[in-house]
Amino acid sequence: MFNNSASGSENTYDAILVGAGIMSSTLAVLLHELEPDLRLLIVERLSSPGLESSSAKNNAGTGHAANCELNYTPIQANGAISTTKAFEINKSFEQSLEFWASLSEKGQLMPKTFLNKLPHISLVFGDNDISFLKKRFSEISSHAAFSQMDFTMDHAELKDWIPLVMDGREKSEKIAATRIKRGTDIDFGNLTRSYINMIEPKESIEINYSTNVENLQQDNEGDWYLSLNGTKNNRIVRSKFVFLGAGGGALSLLQKSGIPEGLSYGGFPVSGKWLICEEEKSTKIHNAKVYGNAAVGAPPMSVPHLDTRWINGERSLLFGPFAGFSSNFLKYGSKLDLFRSIKPTNFFPMIQAGLDNLDLGKYLFNQLIQTNEDRIETLKRFLPLVSPSDWKLSVAGQRVQIIKQTPQGGVLKMGTEVVTSSDGSLAALLGASPGASTAVTIMIEVLNRCWHEKMKSGQWQNRMLELFPSIGSDINSNQEVLSSIRQRNDFLLKLS
């Protein structure tokens, strides 16, 4: 039997976390902080943590707080602007800051290794987009969470905000921007490694690198058994809780688990590319994350942005994203990933989602046939005086967009989604943006769903309050709590 070979305490754990990226490492730190004696096993297929989607060059590095991302405030059919997602993401990112601040206060995390303060700017061109930006500014800046937002159409002021972007631009050009100075750039790869370095020496923590999860199944008693294939040894391990935080690889493992909740999910992989500049003559001048608006008919993932980045402490500029296609579900995965994921239960939802998103297919095709000269032309919209030789193409990570069976049929979803078994013994994270920025909130959701009895205990509640002093309060409706927690976070994370 699959489970007999997992007998013995050395192969039994309180939780097994698959993947050593930002999601699993966040959950591991939370569990260890809440109950240090919990025996945790982290299984990573690569040789070290944070090498897939969490790696700095594989993502935008934006601390997504809806300060500048226009796709988080879409226009509804009646012409009104929807702000619900913006406030949710802003609140979630503040919770991430709160967690990092608490760990920093305890001396367990060094903010300067992964976190930099950086203005977040929305930039638009032409009457229609300027009208939208004005409306967005009027709507969200009236709330405390975005009260520090500025708006301008003045070229001289814009020259002060984004000098590199304004160089060579005609004074008659219609252009507008909003800015929040309290934005951030984050090296999620370094943050992941900081988490792992924090917990790896603990006796209750075990991390297996260069190890694949070949299969997993649940017995009649509710225990999960995972078959591991590693470079050092193969073994079967047991736990009452499993978290699948393996990025694009989570879908195939969810399917192998056989839980009914995962049967109707499919995925569509999209690869990313960036133009990167490391020339000091440019990197020293530009100091912001500047997000534009997606072209008419283009999907939200196509939003262009020009970002200052700190990667392993080195400053650079990044522009994109440009999309590509690979059937891999992971950057270091197999070309067969997509085809292996197609099952009788998700085949028709995937077909329907494809037919309903022909604009995405057209967008991807146009991206695939782009030359480097085409990409430079796109960059010129942001940098009229761009020097093409200063910019190099870099391949980013893989993103697997969720396709889900709903009462309305197969639906393509652009966000993240937590899938849990009915008994709470298994959880999987699917999807992409805003992802890493809201990892803390997502992992608290996993704890509430799967560890609900523990989360109601006095011990865990007290420890949660130590880590999240604002927990239980809605910072979107309580301005006093919002102000207090932001002051605390800024002080402890040196964002003041």
Image (cartoon, rainbow, N blue to C red):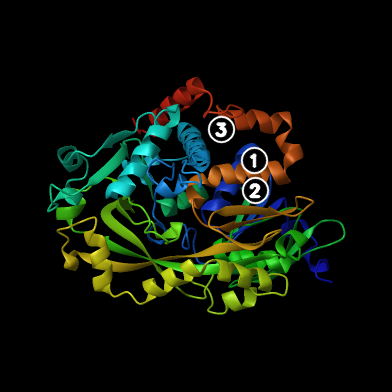
Is residue 200 shown to the viewer in this render? no
The mark nearer the N terminus, 2 or 1, is 1
Q: Amino acid at mark 1?
A: Pro
The mark found on residue 204 in the picture is 2
The quarter in which the C terminus is drawn is top left
Residue at the spot of label 3: 467
Give 126 or 29, whichever is nearer the viewer.
126
Residue at the front extreme of this rendering: 78
Of tags 3 and 2, the one toward the viewer is 3
Q: Could you tell me which secondary element the residue under label 2 belongs to?
A: loop
Query: Residue 147, percent across and down?
Result: 38, 28
Give yes or no for contact between labels 3 and 2 (Cβ–Cβ under 8 Å): no
Decide: is 81 above or below 148.
below
Q: Residues within 10 Å of mark 2 (few under 14, many from 20)?
A: some
Q: Residues within 10 Å of mark 1 (few under 14, many from 20)?
A: some
The mark nearer the N terminus, 1 or 3, is 1
Q: Residue at x 53, y 23 (%)?
A: 478
In the picture provided, is 216 more to the left or to the right than 299?
right
Decide: is 266 above or below 134.
below
Give yes or no for contact between labels 2 and 1 (Cβ–Cβ under 8 Å): yes
Query: Residue 110, percent across and down?
Result: 41, 40
The mark nearer the N terminus, 3 or 2, is 2
Of tags 1 and 3, the one toward the viewer is 3
Residue at the spot of label 1: 36
Decide: is 212 above or below 83.
below
Query: Residue 437, percent across and down?
Result: 48, 46
Q: Amino acid at mark 2?
A: Ser
Q: How many marks?
A: 3
Give yes or no for contact between labels 1 and 3 (Cβ–Cβ under 8 Å): no
Q: Amino acid at mark 3?
A: Leu
Q: Alpha carbon of mark 3 to alpha carbon of mark 2: how far?
A: 20 Å
